[in-house]
Amino acid sequence: MFQLKTYTAPDFTQEQFVNAPNAALVPAPFDGVAPEQYHALSIFPEYFKIDGQWLLAEESRMDCVPVYENGKIHVREFRVLKQGDLIVTGRTENCQDGIYVHANGFNEQKAQGDVFAFRQNRSRETAFSKDYDEIYELLKHEREHGKIVWVLGPAFSFDADARRAMSKLIENGYAHAVLAGNALATHDLEGAYLRTALGQDIYTQESMPNGHYNHLDLINRVRYHGSISKFIENEKIDNGIIYSCEKCGVPYVLGGSIRDDGPLPPVFGDVYQAQNAMRDQIRSATTVICMATMLHTIATGNMTPSYRVMPDGTIRQIYFYCVDVSEFVVNKLADRGSLSARGIVTNVQDFVVNLQKGLGL
């Protein structure tokens, strides 16, 4: 039986907390501008002493600023700040400025061992058997008690078995939201409509005559019908990742790119609208699995803290996985500050098929 790690809150009766000053609150000088010495948040739980009380930033996001409003700490992007917003200033992390960063609330001290040891990072030589077993149990728990968000690159749509496996995960309750780009949806729908992805058969990988038109024909046809749901209904589509999302009412956010063809009707062309829509899903996520999309993975990682405050007030850990065939992508998240991300270096098509089979679907 899967067990969440217990969160241990700081002991605010300790001298360092009792004697700490109140955090300094300085009004934003203009819309979209923070005051000098603003405090920028991390992925960890952070507490701020306001009028003698330590308040947790409940919906945190790395590289955003804490705003005190109506008795709570709100976390906002610089671009949405309003003149006069009361922003916490100070750049210390251990109570000196009334700010405390609680980096070990889930008691994840690293095991003691030799200073020198082989294979400390995640690489293609790492054994991932234990990771798979943990993910099976985690997903079974999260299906009933959490929110699983998948961040998908287009690699899935190029393989018939991977599309089928991801559809089974969605249809069996193992996905509560999907974040992707125009390419994933386009090539997945192309696979359902024409059995190709970028003009290649999704099973044999054989290139079809004039196949380079296929994804454009697909986009054009969806735009003709006015929406993906109408396209699925009118063209009698009955398979694929996006089909399963529509069938099961699983929300999906398609963030646009400057290189997009078309794009499909629901794709966000405004990057900040896409960011807002993605964060709306991440706000309540408890497990995030990113596969084969470096930029969407980094974006999601920057939006995802290491913890979540649940509706009953308890604080639990967020599980974050990055799966990619490239070690560079897997390890880059840590370089970007997403220190709680767990990396798995493998072919993502194989990964999702293994998940489907391991869950008995």
Image (cartoon, rainbow, N blue to C red):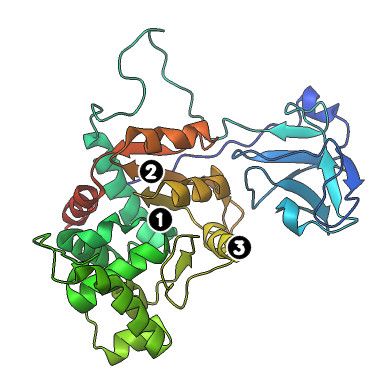
- Where, quadrant-wise, is the C terminus in this rendering? bottom left
Sequence-wise first label, 3 or 1? 1
The residue tagged with tag 3: helix, strand or loop? helix
Residue at the image point whose x is 28% and y is 40% from the top? 325
Q: Nearer the viewer, residue 348 or 213?
A: 213
The vertical placement of 359 against 214, above or below, is above
Residue drawn at x 34%, y 63% as measured from the top left: 184
Residue 127 at least partly seen: yes
Instruction: Indicate whether 104 appears above or below 254.
Output: above
Kind of residue at badge 2: Cys
Q: Which residue is mark 1?
A: 151
Q: Between 98 and 323, which is closer to the camera in this rendering?
A: 323
- The residue pinned by badge 2 equals 322
Which residue position holds label 3?
A: 276
The CA distance from mark 2 to mark 3 is 21 Å
Q: Are marks 2 and 3 in contact (CB under 8 Å)?
A: no
